[in-house]
Image (tube, grey):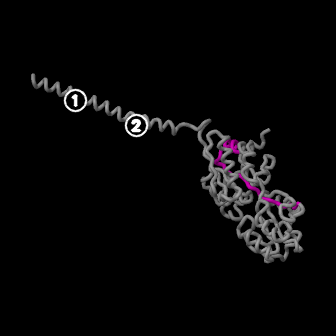
Amino acid sequence: MKKLLAFLLGIMVMTTMVAGCGGDYKKKEEPKKSAATEQKKEEAKPAAGGAQKFFNIATGGTSGTYFPIGGAIADVLNKNIPGANASAQSTGAAVANINLLQQGKVDIAFVQNDIAYYADKGTEMFKDKKVDGLQALACLYPETVQIVTLAGTDIKSVSDFKGKRVAVGAAGSGTEANARQILKAYGLTYDDVKVQYLSFGEASGALKDGNVDVAFVTAGFPTAAIQDIATQKVIRLIPVDGDKADALIKDYPFYTKVKIKANTYNKQDADVNAVAILCMLAVTNKMDEKTAYDVTKAIFTNLDRIKASHSAANVISKETALNGVSVPLAPGADKFFNEK
C-alpha cells in the first residue's frame, strides 16, 4: 500500500512539473512566434496602391546635366506611380549607361541618341558589340554640335575646312564621330584636313593660341569651352547648311536640326543653323508595356518639376519627344504618345 501511494504521488508530481514546463514554454515561445509573424506580415505588405516597383536610373557625373534631371525624374516617379521606389545613380554617362542597361543593373538610362544608335547597330565604339533589346522612352533636349573658329579666319563654311587644322574631339568620342559625319556630308574626309584629336578644353586653348583653325564641340549651349574662347577672342560659329543637315539626318537618323540663338556667346550677333544629337531616356525590352507607359506618362505630365531641376530641361516637351529617337520606341511609350 505504501508503495502504491508513493507511486501515485510520484505521478502527480511529474504531471505538475510537465504542466508547469508547458506553461513556461508557451510563455517564452509565444512572443517570438508573434514577432516573427508580424515581421513577415510587414515584409509581405504591398506598397500603397500595389506591388513595389524599383527604378534604378543611370545618369552621369554629379556636376553634369543628367544627374539633377535624373533626380527630378526619380522624384516624379515616386510621387506619381503607386509603389514606385526610384533613385538616380551617378555614372560614367552614355556608353557606361548602355552597358549597365545591358547587364540589367539599371532600369532607365540617360544616353546620347547617337551612342544608342551605335549600340543598336553595332558600329563605332560598339563595333562587334551590338546591344540587343535597346528601346527608347523619349528624347529630352539637344546636345548641339558646335563648330567654332576665330572671326579673323577665312573659314565661313565646312567646305572651307580643306587643308585646315581641325580639332575633332577626343579619339573615339561621340564628338569625333559627329565631326567625321559632318565632314562626310560636305564631301570631305580626314584625308582632306589636318586632324587633331583634342578634348574640349584642349581645343579651346589650341584655338586661342592659333594652333588649330577650327574645333568641333558637342555639348549643350552655352558651352564653357567656347565661352572661354569668346571672352578673349571674337569667335565665329560655322553653320551646317539645311541641305547638308537633311542629308546627314537621312544617313544618321539620330540627328535633329537646331538653331544656336544670337548672343548665346559674346559678340555672336546672328542665329546659327546647327545639328544636334539628343539626350534620350533608354530602357530595354525587359520593361513591360504598362510600366513603360506609366513612366512616360508620369514624366510628361509633370514637366514643371523636371524643368525646375536644370535649365537644359526647359526645352523638354511632349511635342518634340520623338524627334531624334534612334532605337525602337518602347511599346508603352508609343501608346502614351499616340493617345488622343
Judging by the rendered image, the residue that carries numbered circle 1 is 14
Mark sitting on residue 98: none
Q: Identify the element where label 2 is drawn.
A: helix
As measured in the structure, the alpha-carbon distance from the residue carrying label 2 to the one carrying label 1 is 27 Å
Tell me which corner region of the image, top left, top right, bottom left or bottom right, holds residue 146: bottom right
- Residue 249 lies, with reference to residue 158, above or below; the image says above
Residue at the far front in the pictured view? 231
Mark sitting on residue 32: 2
Q: Residue at x 41, y 35 (%)?
A: 33
Q: Residue at x 77, y 72 (%)?
A: 167
Number of numbered callouts drawn: 2
Q: Foreground: 135 or 35?
A: 35
The region drawn magenta spans 271-295
Q: Quadrant of the C terminus?
A: top right
Q: Foreground: 83 or 288?
A: 83
Q: Could you tell me residue 177's position as x and y percent? A: 75, 66
Q: Earlier in the sequence, mark 2 or mark 1?
A: 1
Q: Quadrant of the N terminus?
A: top left
Q: Could you tell me residue 247's position as x and y percent? A: 85, 61
Q: Could you tell me residue 320's position as x and y percent? A: 80, 49
The reply to whether dot 2 and dot 1 touch (C-beta < 8 Å) is no
Residue at the far left in the pictured view? 1
In the rendered structure, does residue 277 fall within the stretch colored magenta? yes
